[in-house]
Image: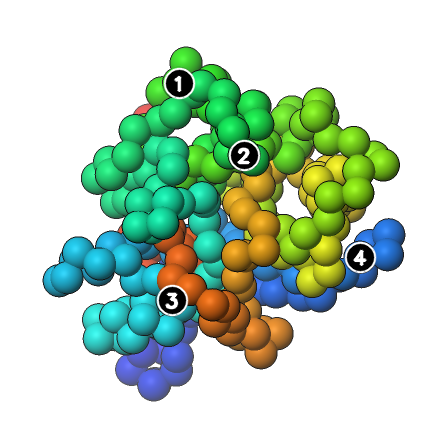
Amino acid sequence: MIWRALLAGVALVLPWQAQAASCDEVAYKGADYAVCTVDLTQDVLRLFLYQPDTGRPYGYFGTLNAALEEQGFALGFAANAGMYHDDRKPVGVYIEDGQTEQSVITRAGPGNFGLLPNGILCLRDRRADVIETLRYVDEAPDCTSATQSGPMLVIDGALHPRFLRNSTSRFVRNGVGTSDDGKTAVFVISNTPVTFHAFGSFFRDHLGLRNALYFDGNVSRLRAPDLGRNDIGFGALGPIIGVVEGQILPPLPLEDPYDE
């Protein structure tokens, strides 16, 4: 059937071809959020930091998109993906396409990153998982790519123990949550300043996600073509995560009918 369609000039969307992530605006308990959902069984989700030809950080969605277009692809949804130093070097563990750029950090420390428990977004073949850092160290998952940030927003269905319902600390915030089966990653940025408690509650109570990780605050940026949004900001980013449109996932291996 496939070859007949090709001969007839009919465009096919194969089951392993990358699709664009879908983004929506959501209002919840007095705050507005942009929510982008990535289907890891269909979408090619990747981490990016350094340009291979110059060694400099991509820094901006436009720079990354231009580089992908030279390869025949395009950047769909994208967001900042973890905390970084002034030179854009990641604060915690960073792995990109199997290459480790920075090792995992397990100790407590100043700032949001060191507010334990923190966590790691682990990308593997057709799945993404938010994993608490100490569990990540114990389980040593074989992540193709990974980025560390903190604090965890939701840990196994519970909000971070340091979050206060009556906190007065409100910022624009962004983060990611993953489904238990690893097939779905949901990226969220608040369009209005919110507390950590409100942000974590959105992931747990509204999105129904049992594990979620904070990426950053006022430096947070989003590229969401569905929403006509392509944030530029006032400075270059460190790690960027995004869906690569036009890149194709390899087909899943066929099951052996004789394999019992």
Q: Residue at x 78, y 31 (%)?
A: 164
With respect to residue 256, does 57 lie above or below? below
The type of residue carrying mark 4 is: Ala
User: Dot 3 lies on which element?
Assistant: loop
Task: Locate the C terminus by quadrant.
Answer: top left
Residue 44 % position (x, y)? 39, 56
For disc 2, the marked residue is 111
Q: Amino acid at mark 2?
A: Gly
Q: CA distance from mark 1 to mark 4?
A: 35 Å
Label 4 environment density (alpha carbons within 10 Å; few <14, some 14–19, many ≥20) = some
Task: Tell us which disc is closer to us: 1 or 4.
Answer: 4
Mark number, residue 199 = none
Q: Which residue is mark 1?
A: 137
Instruction: Report the residue marked by disc 4.
Output: 31
Indicate left or right for 130 with 227 as reference.
Answer: left
Where is residue 244 drawn, in percent x and y? 37, 63
What residue is disc 3 on? 60
